[in-house]
Image: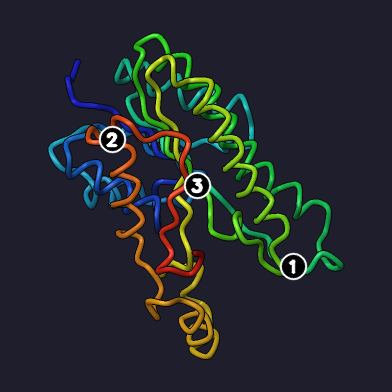
């Protein structure tokens, strides 16, 4: 069995998740990459991410507890341990509250917040046995500040912050560190569809006058999840160009 450290990344096939997978691969980690779409081109992704490491792709809908359990079981069966867990899987179903459907609220909470619980719940028992581990949860600055038209998404991301701080207190005695990254506006597929006028308006709200890149989020995740972090836990790191101060 390989001596490489092992990182499990949910929603790890595109955007921020793929950038996170790449930086851990570059630093010699074996990867368990979770995805949900049956249209995902696994072969191309493996060629793009692989870097003298082993990669296991596991299709699972993290909002379903049994599928999250199976994801972690697959990771343990393949690699025997989990050193880092990155809960990145997330969806949006934006609308003003007067127009928001109940199912749109429920689905965002189920994937973003419950999904984070489902995967973490299944992973921590293995980390606790080894008395070591890092958990990095991807929240959002809207979980700190709120945002019109995103009450479901903001609630899910605020919930992740509270969840992370709570498990950080629970798990600290077992040598497990848990932290949040709260990205601001990041240039991904989701923001690419916005009009130039909307993008300009967004950039004007950011002191650095530009959106961040997935790679900038990935570096922050690696900072908190990598071997250099030995004393930071229960924290929320805003990576947002100064938008929230």
Residue highlighted by disc 3: 38
N-terminal label among 3 and 2: 3
Colour scheme used in the picture?
A: rainbow
Residue 25 horizontal side relative to residue 134, left or right: left
**The N terminus sits in image quarter:** top left
> In terms of depth relative to the viewer, which is nearer, 44 or 235?
235
* Residue under pointer 1: 95
Which residue is at the far front? 245
Residue 216's quadrant in the figure?
bottom left
Q: CA distance from mark 1 to mark 2?
A: 38 Å
Circle nearer the viewer, 3 or 2 = 2
**Circles 1 and 3: CB distance less than 8 Å?**
no
Q: Judge the density around disc 2: few (<14), some (14-19), many (≥20) Cα neighbours within 10 Å.
A: few
Rendering coords of residue 85 (x, y %)? 40, 32
Q: Residue at x 52, y 25 (%)?
A: 169
Marks 1 and 3: which is nearer the front? 1
Residue receiving disc 2: 229
Q: Residue at x 71, y 55 (%)?
A: 152
Q: Is residue 103 above or below residue 93?
A: above
Taking 223 as reference, is 183 left or right?
Answer: right
Element on which disc 1 rests? loop
Helix, strand or loop at label 2? It is loop
State the residue at coordinates (52%, 44%): 36
Label 3 SS: loop
Q: Nearer the viewer, residue 1 or 232?
A: 232
Per the model, the C-alpha gap separating discs 1 and 3 is 27 Å
Q: Earlier in the sequence, mark 1 or mark 3?
A: 3
The picture quadrant where one finds residue 177 is: top left
Residue 226 higher or lower than 37, as above or below: above
């Amino acid at each position: 069995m390989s001596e490489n450290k092992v990182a499990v990344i949910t929603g790890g096939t595109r955007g921020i998740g793929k950038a996170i997978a790449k930086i851990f691969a570059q630093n010699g980690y074996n990867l368990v990459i979770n995805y949900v779409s049956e249209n995902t081109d696994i072969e191309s992704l493996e060629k793009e991410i692989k870097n003298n490491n082993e990669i296991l792709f596991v299709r699972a809908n993290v909002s379903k507890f049994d599928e999250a359990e199976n994801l972690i079981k697959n990771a343990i069966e393949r690699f025997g341990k989990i050193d880092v867990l990155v809960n990145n899987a997330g969806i949006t179903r934006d609308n003003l509250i007067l127009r928001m459907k109940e199912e749109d609220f429920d689905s965002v909470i189920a994937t973003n917040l419950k999904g984070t619980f489902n995967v973490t719940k299944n992973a921590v028992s293995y980390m606790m046995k080894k008395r070591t581990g890092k958990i990095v949860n991807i929240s959002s600055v809207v979980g700190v500040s709120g945002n019109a038209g995103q009450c479901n998404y903001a609630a899910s991301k605020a919930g992740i912050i509270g969840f992370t701080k709570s498990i950080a207190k629970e798990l600290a005695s077992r040598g497990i560190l848990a932290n949040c990254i709260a990205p601001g506006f990041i240039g991904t597929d989701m923001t690419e569809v916005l009009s130039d006028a909307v993008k300009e308006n967004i950039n004007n709200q950011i002191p650095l006058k530009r959106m961040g890149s997935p790679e900038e989020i990935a570096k922050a995740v690696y900072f908190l999840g990598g071997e250099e972090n030995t004393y930071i836990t229960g924290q929320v790191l805003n990576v947002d160009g100064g938008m929230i101060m």
